[in-house]
Image: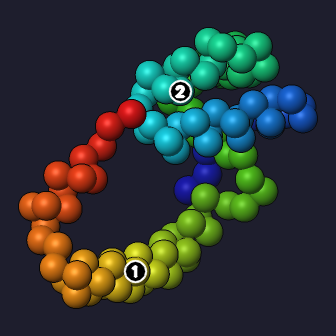
Amino acid sequence: MSFASSFHPLGKEAAAAILKASSVFEECPRPETSASAVKENKYLKELAHDIGIIAARNNWKHIFIRLSSRSPKDAAFAKHRIENLYEAELKQVLAEEEAIGLNRDEISRYTTFHC
């Protein structure tokens, strides 16, 4: 399946702002974190404005933004490998937790998401 496309140049400053905002979001993955990053950075504000213009000009209600030269379809190939890596790591972590006597209730008490 193919979708209509539009290309927009991305300057170094905007790329750096996206990387920084991504790091902040990884620390606290909430929608308001992203909104705050856009409000606080002039390059992200300009980029959001430009994306809005492109969407309006093309009468698009939804958009997908690709920041990589790789096809989104490539992600499907990596997904299986990532799931296997995750499962292997999870098994190792659970075995280590069991070896030191931690139980799931105690662990969840210390790993509850806060930011």
Question: Few, some or many C-alpha atoms within 10 Å of disc 1 (few <14, some 14-19, many ≥20)?
Answer: few
The foreground one among 63 and 5 is 63
Quarter of the image where the C terminus is located? top left
In which quadrant of the rendered view does residue 10 lie? top right
Q: Secondary structure at mark 1?
A: helix
Residue drawn at (13%, 67%) of the image:
104
The residue beneath circle 1 is 89
Please name the residue that numbered disc 2 is placed on.
34
Q: Given this view, does label 2 or label 1 mark the residue nearer the observer?
A: 1
Q: Quadrant of the N terminus?
A: bottom right
The image position of residue 82, as x and y in percent, is 48, 75
> Which of 47/95 is in front?
95
From what the image shows, is residue 69 above or below residue 36? below
Q: Position of residue 54 (x, y in %)?
A: 70, 20
Q: Earlier in the sequence, mark 2 or mark 1?
A: 2
What is the number of the mark on residue 46? Answer: none
| SS for dot 2 | helix
Residue pictured at 80% horizontal, 37% vertical: 15
Question: 24 or 49: nearer the eye?
Answer: 24
Few, some or many residues within 10 Å of mark 2 (<14, 14–19, 20+): some
Q: Which amino acid lies under the numbered mark 1 shown in the image of this protein?
A: Glu
Q: Please determine whether, in this image, residue 26 is positioned above or below residue 17.
A: below
Count of number-bearing discs: 2
Toward which corner of the image does residue 65 lie, by quadrant? top right
Residue type at tag 2: Ser
Q: Is residue 20 visible?
A: yes
Residue 52 appears in the picture as rendered: no
Kindly identify the residue that appears in the image at 53 percent across and 37 percent down: 25
